[in-house]
């Protein structure tokens, strides 16, 4: 059992215990938090089916919680859906229905998808009348008979999920909504994703995001069902939440419908945990794991979102994603010396979860970054006598190269030349010292090795709005106020306590290519869970 520790710098303190679980590629980390107090923590190996590892983590954590105390909510972050997309496994046969004719015919659905991924979901694509202009006017009326005929063909093809995407549907979603109803009438049990629910302006990228989401629908239902079974086995009848890639929470039912929002939630959990543990609201987070290092920026305590289209499994999308840079550097990275030049190569291969078996400091034969860190005095781990024969020049040159790689990545993440606070988290943070160029200060908060699970446990509930506003009939200030109010309303609807909701991000983009005085506004709001400490 860990010593009860008070952490963080949060102003709103929940009174009920939260369990935070983060499922990584190597370990599943879990913590129990009572407000800012860490009651328990554990690490267990991640299992292939995910849920077995979660069950083990739950069992260990519950055994450490003081008698008579029970959690009030469980928050889980997982890479399971990301892995399914990358590995092309467990995907649902999915059709894409675009509502745009007679427009967009030169770039049909899935035009930019890797062939193996398109094949993995079936590659079924359809185009139909419909869609809108930027101001909500119809491009062409929706032909309901045409949609029913398409639905019948989908049923013959064995389609189990569908993505429906209309031109400018974030401005006017009515055609997507009507088409979705028809598909559900004609194909009982089909899982339909409408693109306006999970993407932004930009039809190809939004369509891609909706298609990815639809293809993960079956896996999401199965996985979340398995997590609920794990909770039931532990007699936990409490709300279940999954962490999103914007640093906020969604309830399990919402997550089953929109699994795409969990993609990249791992680095996001670590960044939120780093912000909570260190009190840093604006700065850089360096999360060093067993195989890779993720570097991201904090803005007002939340991960900075990417401003450009991101690729998932080789597919361009434009839904919200954290702006994160990843490099192949971790505690298990294999170290090699090239000839007599003294040049050192780090990775990209890593022994990962085999570190305590294969690395030299634990009696193995593979020289890793952890061995070098121990030899340099950066950490005390394993059996130091096993690495005394390491060449001192090799050790010093490797440490310099590790530091250089981290500094370069931090520098790429910064938007100005000004030094910023750098927060080091993750089990591999032992690889670097506290003297980093470009950092105003370097922080190593307590329990940084489980920052990901703490970030999951202490996540807030968010609401986000993106819309195109024509300024011919309203002022800029009125448009901003309208967007802010809707973002707050969405956060409250998602489960945030009304009095705790704050605006945490605002973006304005003038749309100079449109034939009127239009502006694109994005607003994000976040607040504390209404049923945990409120």
Image: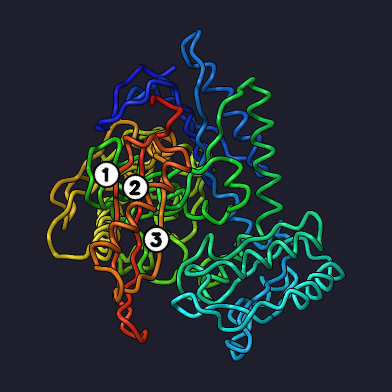
In the rendered image, the vertical position of residue 20 relative to residue 215, given as above or below? above
Query: Residue beneath label 1, please?
Result: 376
In the rendered image, the vertical position of residue 504 relative to residue 468, given as above or below? above
> Residue 313: which quarter of the image?
bottom right
> Residue 98: which quarter of the image?
bottom right
What is the crowding at mark 1: few (fewer than 14 residues within 10 Å), some, or many (at least 20)? some
Report x, y in % for residue 231.
63, 28
Which one is in front, 373 or 50? 50
Which one is in front, 477 or 205? 477
| Pointers 3 and 2 in contact (C-beta within 8 Å) | no
Which one is in front, 450 or 290? 450
Query: Residue beneath label 2, please?
Result: 372
Report x, y in % for residue 503.
29, 49
Counting residues from the start of the chain, the first of labels 1 and 3 encountered is 3
Report x, y in % for residue 368.
42, 49
Which one is in front, 18 or 61? 18
Counting residues from the start of the chain, the first of labels 3 and 2 encountered is 3
Q: Is residue 475 left or right of residue 87?
A: left
In the rendered image, the vertical position of residue 49 relative to residue 245, given as above or below? above
Q: Is residue 457 left or right of residue 301?
A: right
What is the crowding at mark 3: few (fewer than 14 residues within 10 Å), some, or many (at least 20)? some
**CA gap, disc 3 to disc 2?**
18 Å
For the C terminus, give its image quadrant: top left
Query: Residue beneath label 3, please?
Result: 327
């Amino acid at each position: 059992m860990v010593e009860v520790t008070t952490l963080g710098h949060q102003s709103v303190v929940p009174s009920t215990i939260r369990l935070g679980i983060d499922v990584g590629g190597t370990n599943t980390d879990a913590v129990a938090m009572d407000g800012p107090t860490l009651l328990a923590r554990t690490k267990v190996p991640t299992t292939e089916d995910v849920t077995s590892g979660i069950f083990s983590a739950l069992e260990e954590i519950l055994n450490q919680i003081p008698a008579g105390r029970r959690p009030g909510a469980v928050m889980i972050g997982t890479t399971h859906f990301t892995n399914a997309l990358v590995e092309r496994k467990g995907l649902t046969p999915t059709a894409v229905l675009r509502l745009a004719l007679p427009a967009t015919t030169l770039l049909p659905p899935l035009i930019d998808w890797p062939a193996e991924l398109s094949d993995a979901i079936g590659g079924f694509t359809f185009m139909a009348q419909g869609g809108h202009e930027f101001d909500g006017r119809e491009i062409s009326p929706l032909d309901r008979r045409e949609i029913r005929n398409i639905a019948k063909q989908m049923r013959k093809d064995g389609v189990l999920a569908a993505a429906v995407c209309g031109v400018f549907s974030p401005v006017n979603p009515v055609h997507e909504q009507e088409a979705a109803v028809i598909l559900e009438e004609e194909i009982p049990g089909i899982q339909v994703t409408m693109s306006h629910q999970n993407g932004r302006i930009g039809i190809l990228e939004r369509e891609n995001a909706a298609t990815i989401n639809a293809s993960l629908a079956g896996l999401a239902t199965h996985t979340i069902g398995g997590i609920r079974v794990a909770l039931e086995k532990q007699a936990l009848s409490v709300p279940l939440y999954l962490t999103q890639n914007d640093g906020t929470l969604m309830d399990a039912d919402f997550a089953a419908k929109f699994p795409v929002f969990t993609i990249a939630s791992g680095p996001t959990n670590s960044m939120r945990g780093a912000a909570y543990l260190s009190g840093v609201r604006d700065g850089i987070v360096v999360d060093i794991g067993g195989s890779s290092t993720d570097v991201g920026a904090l803005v007002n305590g939340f991960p900075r979102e990417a401003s450009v289209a991101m690729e998932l499994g080789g597919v361009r999308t434009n839904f919200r994603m954290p702006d994160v840079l990843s490099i192949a550097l971790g505690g298990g990275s294999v170290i090699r010396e090239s000839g007599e030049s003294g040049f050192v190569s780090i990775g990209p291969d890593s022994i990962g979860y085999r570190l305590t078996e294969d690395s030299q400091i634990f009696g193995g034969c593979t020289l890793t970054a952890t061995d070098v860190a121990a030899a340099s005095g950066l950490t005390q781990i394993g059996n130091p006598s096993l690495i005394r024969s390491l060449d001192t020049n090799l050790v010093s040159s490797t440490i310099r190269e590790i530091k250089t790689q981290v500094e370069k990545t931090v520098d790429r993440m910064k938007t100005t030349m000004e030094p910023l606070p750098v927060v080091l988290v993750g089990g591999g943070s032992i690889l670097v010292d506290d003297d980093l160029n470009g950092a105003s200060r370097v922080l190593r908060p307590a329990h940084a090795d489980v920052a990901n699970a703490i970030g999951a446990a202490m996540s807030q509930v968010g609401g986000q709005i993106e819309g195109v506003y024509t300024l011919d009939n309203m002022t800029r200030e009125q448009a901003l106020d309208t967007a802010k109010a809707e973002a707050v309303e969405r956060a409250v609807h998602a489960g945030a306590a009304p009095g705790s909701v704050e605006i945490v991000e605002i973006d304005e983009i003038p749309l100079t290519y449109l034939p009127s005085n239009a502006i694109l506004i994005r607003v994000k709001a976040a607040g504390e869970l209404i049923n945990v400490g409120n």
